[in-house]
Structure formats: C-alpha cells, structure tokens
C-alpha cells in the first residue's frame, strides 16, 4: 500500500514561557520546535507506523534540518521536501494569553514554504500516494493548489482516498475564489475533519445536523467534528457516534487537531471500528495539549494505549 501524503508548510515555532499579550519586551523563550500543520499531521502518521510522506520546502538552514531530522526519525519520507539554498525556513513566535488565546509573530514572508513547487520528487511521491490529506491553509498557494487538483483524479481512479482539514479563516471563505477551492476539495473528500467553528462557517448559518446531512448527501463519506476538550463526533450514512474527550490539563493546544486527524485516519485505514478510532484520536489530541511544542506531543500506538489505560474520560 502507498503512503498517506500531505502537501504544505514546514516551519519552526518559538514559544514564550510566560503568559502575555505579545512580544513588545524581551522575554524568555523556548524552542525552536518543529512545526507547520501539515508537518505535525504527517509526523503523527509516521509515529503510528503507517507509510507517510510530505511534499514541502525548507531553507538550507538549521531550522530546516531540525524539521527534516525529526520527520525522518519518526518514519516520514522527506524525499519530496526541497531544500532551497536561497530561502529561509519560516518561523512563528507564539505567546499564550491568560484566556488561552494566542498572540503570534509570523516570519513567513518569502520563506521556503511559499516556494513549494511541483518538482520531479514531488510528482513521484504524489503518483504513489494511497491517500492525500488536504490542508485548507495550502489552497491559496498556486503550486500547492495545482498539485492537489492534479493528483486527485488519478488517486481516485486507483482507489485512493482524500481527507480534508479546512483549517480556515472566515475571510478565506468570503473570497469567491477561496470558497470555490474549498467546495472543489469537499466534492472529492472522503473524510472531512472540521472543528465546530469551521463546520458553522461552511454551513453559512445552517445548524450542525443540517450541515452534516448536506455534506453526506454531497458524497462526503465520513465527517469527524473536533470539539476540543469535549472530544469529537463522527457522522456517516449509518448515523452518529459521540466520544467524550479525556480529562487533561491543557498546556499548549497547538497541533491537537492535526494529531487527532492523523490518528483517526490511520486507525480507520488499519480497519479499526469508529469507536476505537475516535478513542485513539481523542487520546492523541489530549496528549498533544499536555506537552509544550506543537509536534512534541505526537504519539505512537504504544503511547496512546498507555495513556488510555491511565486516563480519565471527561463526563459528557
Ligand atoms: P488546532 O487547530 O489547535 O490544532 P482544532 O480546532 O483543529 O485544533 P480541537 O478540537 O481544538 O481541534 O482539538 C482536536 C482534538 O484534540 C479534540 O477533538 C480532542 O480530542 C483533543 N483535545 C483538544 N483540546 C483538548 C483538551 N483541552 N482536553 C482534552 N482533549 C483535547
């Protein structure tokens, strides 16, 4: 079986160790941590022992090497990550506010992630994919957009599947072109992984049940709604399954949605029933939020089993 493949940004994250509103004064920082939503997702796929590959680009610098070393160590094929001599690997500085929201400084302008291209290596990896995970954040990048839509027809023709995490902002959907790109991906999506807020954005005012019914009627086979600390809900033609989250202390929520989605996907591809896949995915998300650094909390199945054995389920 071919790998799960995703396309998109790789960067590092540097984190303030104290709560506050931003970066207007010198402060203590930790990091750099490997990051980028597609990178976190694919790292989790690799850690679970499933074939995994990412199409991306990094600079010829330590931040790029840090990411490549980590992904390789966790079993991810990085042959389609271009190392670009003239570009820098991007970085994001994050500081948590007391209310749990985040203040960011992004150093992504002209970074390697914006220069992802359909190289020969990228085409080779995509031609062998068994599954493509599409991230909404990549759709506005023309080369990424182009590779996604060039890949999907052949992938589907050979029995492959597509998952879609919209990780989208409201402005993107208001833009007609942005909206059209999202609808085009949805039309070929087998597994849709929105948060509650994202589902509401797509549904444009329709309630959760109506939005889900509409998507299933349009051909999406499975929908998993991520509900943060409350856990997740799964919908398909056979009905609905709710799974409460695990009770943990949230220290750093970044990356939870990506490790959750990767774990649900790998568990389903391994033939596990919906309930077990949801429980593993909730465990992966919960572990991620208890550890500082977006990719530091990705998990093996052994780690998930140990976590579940000792964990407390939040009462619904
Ligand atoms: P992000 O964009 O920050 O990666 P998201 O909005 O896509 O996240 P969330 O719903 O925040 O997704 O988190 C994904 C999953 O992680 C949840 O469905 C849940 O299983 C787990 N999770 C997240 N936050 C918590 C928490 N505080 N306690 C326990 N589990 C959590």
Image: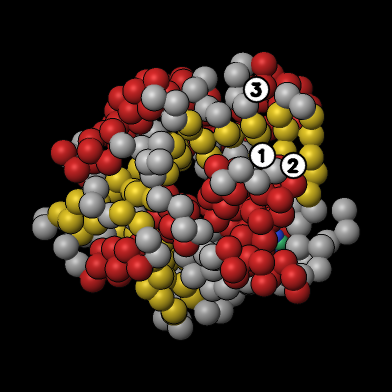
Secondary structure category for the residue under label 3: helix
Judging depth in this view, the residue of 28 and 26 nearest the camera is 28
Q: Residue at x 76, y 57 (%)?
A: 245
Q: Residue at x 15, y 54 (%)?
A: 84
Q: Position of residue 222 (x, y in %)?
A: 64, 31
Q: Examine the image and state in which quarter residue 1 appears.
A: top left
Q: Position of residue 197 (x, y in %)?
A: 66, 40
Kindly identify which residue carries mark 2: 233
Which of marks 3 and 1 precedes in the sequence? 3
Dot 1, crowdedness within 10 Å: few (<14), some or many (≥20)? Answer: many
Q: Position of residue 27 (x, y in %)?
A: 45, 81
Q: Residue at x 46, y 52 (%)?
A: 50
Kindly identify which residue carries mark 3: 215
Secondary structure category for the residue under label 1: strand
Q: Is residue 72 left or right of residue 229?
A: left
Looking at this view, name the residue that lies furthest to the right: 315
Q: Are marks 1 and 2 in contact (CB under 8 Å)?
A: yes
């Amino acid at each position: 079986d071919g790998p799960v493949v995703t396309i998109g940004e790789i960067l590092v994250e540097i984190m303030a160790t104290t709560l506050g509103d931003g970066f207007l004064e010198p402060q203590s920082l930790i990091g750099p941590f490997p990051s980028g939503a597609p990178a976190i997702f694919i790292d989790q796929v690799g850690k679970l022992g499933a074939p995994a590959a990412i199409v991306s680009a990094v600079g010829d610098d330590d931040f790029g090497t840090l990411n490549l070393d980590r992904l390789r160590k966790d079993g991810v094929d990085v042959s389609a990550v271009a190392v670009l001599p003239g570009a820098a690997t991007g970085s994001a500085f994050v500081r948590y506010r007391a209310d749990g929201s985040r203040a960011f400084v992004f150093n992504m302008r002209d970074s390697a992630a914006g220069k992802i291209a359909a190289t020969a290596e990228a085409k080779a990896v995509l031609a062998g994919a068994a599954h493509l995970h599409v991230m909404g954040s990549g759709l506005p990048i023309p080369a990424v957009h182009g590779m996604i839509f060039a890949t999907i027809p052949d992938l589907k023709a050979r029995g492959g599947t597509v998952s879609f995490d919209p990780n989208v902002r409201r402005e993107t959907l208001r833009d007609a072109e942005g909206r059209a790109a999202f609808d085009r991906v949805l039309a070929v999506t087998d597994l849709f992984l929105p948060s509650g807020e994202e589902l509401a954005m797509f549904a444009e005012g329709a309630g959760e049940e109506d939005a889900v019914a509409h998507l299933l009627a349009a051909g999406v086979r499975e929908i998993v709604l991520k509900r943060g600390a409350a856990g997740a809900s799964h919908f398909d033609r056979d009905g609905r399954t709710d799974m409460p989250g695990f009770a943990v202390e949230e220290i750093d929520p970044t990356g939870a949605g990506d490790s959750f989605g990767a774990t649900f996907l790998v568990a389903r591809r391994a033939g596990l029933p919906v309930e077990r896949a949801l429980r593993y995915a909730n465990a992966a998300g919960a572990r991620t939020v208890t550890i500082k650094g977006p990719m530091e909390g990705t998990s093996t199945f052994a780690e998930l089993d140990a976590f579940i054995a000792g964990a407390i389920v939040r009462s619904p």
